[in-house]
Each structure stands twice: as C-alpha cells, then as structure tokens.
C-alpha cells in the first residue's frame, strides 16, 4: 500500500514541468518577502499587531517569525533547501491561521508550500540548480 502512494507521487513529479515548480517558488517568494521584511523594518508595528491578536511573547515571536520567513525566501530564491523552506512556511502559516484567521494570502502560502513539499520529495532535487550552474 505504501509503495503505491510513493509511485503515485513519483509519477506526479514526472508529469509536472520544471517551469511550474520554479514558478511556484517565485510565487511563494512574492507572497512572503514583503511581510517577512516588514517584521524588521516596522518592528514595533509588528509587535503591536502580534500583541493585539494574542500571540504570546510578541517581541520574541516577531523576530522568530521574521527570521524563519526571510530564511525561507532565501532558500526558495537559491533553489536549495526547498523542503526545509516549505516546512517552515507551513508552520508559520498554521500559526497565522490559528491566531489571525484564514485569508487568501496565508492560505495561498500554506497550499503552495504543501504543493512544493509534495513536488520535491527526492533528495537529488536539492542539488539540481547548483549542478546546472556548475556544469
């Protein structure tokens, strides 16, 4: 039974062109980059917002969320560690949905990150962009 689901995922990966995967990464970057940077540029506003929605330790959580989001943006832009970026964005978006409620942006990032996670299940895929650049 488990082999059947792995085979389905692998056949799905082969059907999807690389440009769709790259486009998904860029869409995620476009959705996450501005809010990620705003957590540092307008730190006090972000802390006030986190406090207003009831997130505990808002000072610390703004910094943690900002670091996670900026790190995910860099990983997605570089095309390495995409699975780590996807998992971290999934966690951040789940917290956002729990505290703020679902909206089009956090649901888009959540489903985009889940899709990216499913599309990139093979470990060799992490090195494909680096191999293209180097040789």
Image (cartoon, helix red, strand yellow):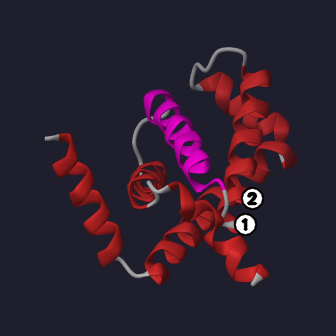
Q: Which residues are magenta?
A: 81-99
- Which of the image's four quarters has the N terminus? top left
- 67 above or below 32? above
Residue pictured at 55% horizontal, 64% vertical: 125
Front one among 110 and 52: 110
Residue marked by disc 2: 74
Question: In the picture provided, is 22 more to the left or to the right than 49?
Answer: left
- Numbered badge on residue 78: 1
Q: CA distance from mark 1 to mark 2?
A: 6 Å
Residue pictured at 72% horizontal, 72% vertical: 130
Residue 122 among magenta residues:
no
Dot 1: within a 10 Å radius of its alpha carbon, few (fewer than 14), some, or many (20 or more) residues?
Answer: few
User: Residue 80, position in %: x, y?
Assistant: 67, 60
Residue pictured at 35% horizontal, 68% vertical: 13
- 2 above or below 51? below
Question: In the picture provided, is 107 more to the left or to the right than 26?
Answer: left
Dot 1 falls on a residue whose secondary structure is helix
Front one among 113 and 1: 1
Quarter of image, res 32: bottom right
Question: In the picture provided, is 16 more to the left or to the right than 116?
Answer: left
User: Outermost residue, left direction?
Assistant: 1
- Which of the image's four quarters has the C terminus? bottom right
User: Residue 10, position in %: x, y?
Assistant: 31, 62
Question: In the picture provided, is 24 more to the left or to the right than 9?
Answer: right
- 104 above or below 58? below
User: Residue 34, position in %: x, y?
Assistant: 71, 59
User: Residue 76, position in %: x, y?
Assistant: 65, 61
Residue 82 among magenta residues:
yes
Residue pictured at 79% horizontal, 23% vertical: 59
- Numbered badge on residue 3: none
């Amino acid at each position: 039974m488990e082999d059947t689901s792995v085979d389905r995922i692998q056949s799905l990966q082969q059907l999807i062109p690389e440009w769709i995967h790259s486009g998904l990464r860029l869409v995620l970057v476009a959705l996450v980059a501005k809010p990620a940077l705003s957590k540092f540029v307008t730190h006090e506003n972000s802390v006030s917002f986190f406090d207003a929605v009831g997130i505990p330790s808002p000072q610390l959580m703004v910094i943690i969320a900002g670091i996670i989001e900026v790190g995910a943006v860099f990983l997605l832009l570089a095309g390495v560690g995409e699975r780590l970026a996807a998992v971290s964005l999934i966690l951040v978006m789940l917290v956002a949905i729990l505290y703020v409620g679902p909206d089009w942006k956090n649901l888009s990032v959540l489903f985009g990150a889940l899709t990216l996670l499913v599309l990139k299940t093979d470990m060799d895929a992490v090195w494909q962009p680096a191999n293209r650049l180097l040789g």
